[in-house]
Amino acid sequence: MPVITAQPPPFGRLQREKHIEQLFRSLRQGRRGSQEPRHSLGEEAGQGDSGTLELRCTTEPEAQSSIPRVLKPAGATESSEQSLALLADVEQLCIIARPGLQGLACEPGRTYSISTASGSQLYVAVEDTSCLCLLSCGPARSCSLRGYDRMAQEVFLFERPPRADACCLGCCLMEMQAFTPDHQLIGTVRQKWSMFTPLMELSDSDGTSYIRIQGPCCPCRCYSTQEFQVVSKIGDKLGKIWKKWPGFNEEYNMDHEYFGLDVPAEMSPETKVLLLAAAFLLNYMFFEMS
């Protein structure tokens, strides 16, 4: 069912920037009180300690051979390159959605918190969509995701064009494009037609495909745990994109809003950003339930 959220509307640049600054200010204040990194569902949703299960990401070793790298997109700004440098040694990214459900008000868009395995906050991704797309299309809605660093500066932009939720015989296949803040193309994630198992393909700014994502047979949104394997063109395993159930919370049961990816540390930041776009696309296609 479509989600009805209470996030700020996607129009109004000043209101959007104030909202992002408030998010990072609350994150900084919350981290000053504790030196040990924590990443609990109650803290992300702004709740107390009761009825809350702590979320911690565990990194599993993966085979790391034939790791592809992509060239930096032409025209990338220095500030965006510095922000993407935060991904240089990252092996795991954890993504948690923070919807706010308040009655029947329709304020489209939701906020995603992107952190490392230790709970260190890296980025905040803010979704831009419309009430019409949200209520009529649900998980198949067209939208854009803007990622911001700790200084509230835009780092990346993901754009998802309108597509049909059910694809038959290769028609209306899903895709998502990744851009720099100045709208220079980083790469594209495209769904490839297959009979039983989901298949995604990643291509660079020149359109050359170099990574594939293979899913399980007949995935379903109601599954609490799912894994999609990230492999090279020659079949070497590079990592995975996963969805996990973090535990039940009495006020916010967001079992479908906890997902992420495991990647080799030596993979280029541009490729990690493209895999991050693939994780969001898989969330819309197979993980999101609200």
Image (cartoon, rainbow, N blue to C red):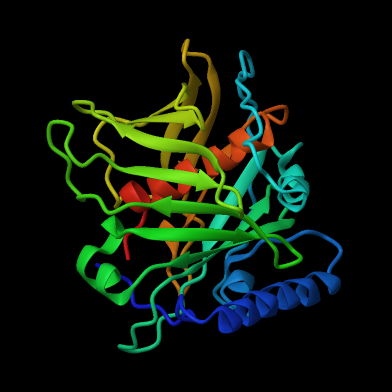
Q: In the image, residue 122 lies at what x, y percent?
A: 70, 56
Picture layout, residue 120 above or below residue 21: above
Residue 54 occupies quadrant: bottom right
On screen, residue 206 above or below 289: above
Residue at image position (57%, 70%) is 52
Comparing 180 with 190, the one in front is 180
Residue 3 rendering spot, x and y as whole percentages: 33, 72
Q: Where does the C terminus fall, quadrant-wise?
A: bottom left
In the rendered image, residue 148, in percent from the top left (x then y), is placed at 65, 61
Q: Please report the residue visible at 60 percent of the width from the left and 49 percent of the height from the top.
A: 180
Side (left or right) of 27 relative to 205: right
Nearer to us in this view, 97 or 232:
232
Q: Is residue 245 visible?
A: yes
Q: Nearer the viewer, residue 180 or 90?
A: 180
**Compared with residue 263, is residue 145 higher up or lower down, i.e. above or below?**
below
- Where residue 113 sits, quadrant-wise, is bottom right
Q: Is residue 47 visible?
A: no
Of residue 50 and residue 186, the one placed in the foreground of this image is: 186
Image x and y of residue 177, in percent: 45, 44
